[in-house]
Amino acid sequence: MKFIPPVCPEPETGPQYFRSPEALADSPELREWAEREFPAGASELTGAESRRDFMKLMSASFMLAGFGLAGCRRPTENIYPFGKQPEGYIHGVPQHFATAMPTRTGAVPLLAKSSDGRPTKVEANPLHPDHCGTDQFVQASVLGLYDPDRAQHFRSKGNIIKREAALDALVQLGKSATSGGGRGLVILAESNGSPTRARLQ
């Protein structure tokens, strides 16, 4: 049998710390409260009948919560087949396309990753001779496609109009600008290195 020598308590040295002024006072009431496993009156709080009633109320509340959340589901969306199946396309397998993002000084050659027709990621095109990586603006450009504040309708003076009405308004605007030599007509557009836009300026 192994002998375990008794541990001799070492004298306490150093500063003493207290959790509260009551612990510093070391009153008999505090010692009695600290030694109790449960607070006073805890055993009288709930009996057998009240526990059963509590479980009934909880089960009823969970059931009502289930009824309330029954409509919080994603809407049913049907997946329709292609009218003409693209060659080599497999659902769920992302595709990559070579593209470019116009900048003030030219364009950034990119490789866009598309999942089921939705662009999800852009990276620098490693096969392009001028690729020098991407910056934060290029990486964030994909988020612009899914921006909830992006214009979704044609508007005129704050009101939503149909496409035909918007095209008619543009035709009338073009006629009035042509007759006046373009005076008073201003087109607000972001910087772009497009040759077509440069010819229109």
Image (tube, grey):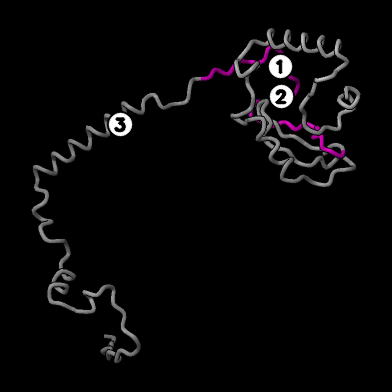
Residue 67: x and y, percent? 31, 26
* Rendered image quadrant of residue 99: top right
The circle on residue 77 is none
Q: Residues within 10 Å of mark 3 (few under 14, many from 20)?
A: few
Kindly identify the amino acid type of the residue bearing the numbered disc 3: Ala
- Does the residue at mark 2 contact the one at mark 1 (Cβ under 8 Å)? yes
Q: Residue at x 88, y 43 (%)?
A: 130
Among the two numbered marks 2 and 3 on one chain, the one whose residue lies closer to the N terminus: 3
Kindly identify the amino acid type of the residue bearing the numbered disc 1: Gln
Q: Residue at x 69, y 37 (%)?
A: 121
The C terminus - image quarter = top right
Secondary structure at numbered mark 1:
loop
For the stretch drawn in magenta, the main secondary structure is loop
Residue 200: x and y, percent? 88, 22
Of residues 54 and 152, the one nearer the viewer is 152
Secondary structure at numbered mark 2:
loop
Residue 56 shown left or right of residue 65 in the figure: left
Residue range in magenta is 77-105
Q: Which residue is mark 2?
A: 89
The circle on residue 65 is 3
Inter-mark Cα distance, 1 to 3:
45 Å
Q: Residue at x 23, y 76 (%)?
A: 23
Rendered position, 170 above or below 140: above
Rendered position, 28 above or below 54: below
Among the two numbered marks 1 and 3 on one chain, the one whose residue lies closer to the N terminus: 3
Q: Which residue is mark 1?
A: 85
Count of marks, rendered view: 3
Q: Residues within 10 Å of mark 1 (few under 14, many from 20)?
A: few
- Does the residue at mark 2 contact the one at mark 3 (Cβ under 8 Å)? no
